[in-house]
Amino acid sequence: MSSWIEWFGMVASVIVAISLTLKNIKRLRIINMVGSLAFTIYGGLIGSYPVLILNGFIVLVNAFYLYRMAQDSKRPERFDILFVHPQTDKYAQLFLKFYSTDIQRFFPRFSNDPVTGTLRDAEGCFILRETLPVSFVAFRREGNGEISILLDYAVPAYRDLKNARFFFETAAAKIASPQTVFSAVAEVGAHESYLRKMGFREVGREGSAILFKK
């Protein structure tokens, strides 16, 4: 077998392997389809019909579901807000516990301790997307009239900013007046980038933490 064909097969394997590490379903299917297409070509090059047919089928399956996703994206999604008490609502506690490791990636100082934790004296809400709880926002009303965003977490499969836009453009009107200032603190680069995309502006720094207001 020619060495370039062997390398082509290895590259196809790497692409498929990378796709399986992705949490975003759409990206997973796109990358997996590219890898499967490469494997289909590889199967043809080496004359292996089982490899060609199997991976050709996987390409079609991925293409079908990507088409379905594209059609669904054209249909207006329904967003709702469900207010809960972060420290007493059982589902909120289960949600925070289940995603605790991932939450720490974006909010390293987050603590769910009922007495000294981040959510003491806080209010909270779930952002529902087609009735699915895809984001959890915890906030606290400060004495100066501002609202501090203590936690703004979206589950991995729904990090397309639509949840955040719904909260700040629609749901926020239910908890504050149009003139209310929202504040947030970013401790990691991904959170900093997110806040800037949502229109927050940097107002200061405390050590490695960046202070934002909107």
Image: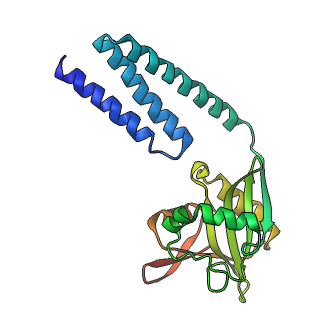
For the N terminus, the quadrant is top left
For the C terminus, the quadrant is bottom right
Where does residue 15 sit, x and y in percent of width and height?
37, 35
Is 44 or 89 nearer to us in this picture?
89
Image quadrant of residue 125? Answer: bottom right
Image quadrant of residue 54? Answer: top left
Where does residue 50 sit, x and y in percent of width and height?
40, 14
Side of 116 relative to 89 (left or right): left
Where does residue 59 sit, x and y in percent of width and height?
49, 23
Is 68 or 113 nearer to us in this picture?
113
Q: How is the image coloured?
A: rainbow
As displayed, is residue 162 above or below residue 143?
A: above
Image quadrant of residue 145? Answer: bottom right
Where does residue 82 sit, x and y in percent of width and height?
80, 61
As displayed, is residue 62 above or below residue 138?
A: above
Residue under the image location 69 percent in, 35 percent down: 72
Is 142 or 46 nearer to us in this picture?
46
Residue under the image location 69 percent in, 75 percent down: 139
Side of 67 relative to 33 (left or right): right
Residue under the image location 40 percent in, 29 percent down: 35
Is 143 or 102 nearer to us in this picture?
102
Residue under the image location 29 percent in, 14 percent down: 45
Check the image and name the residue furthest to the right.
174
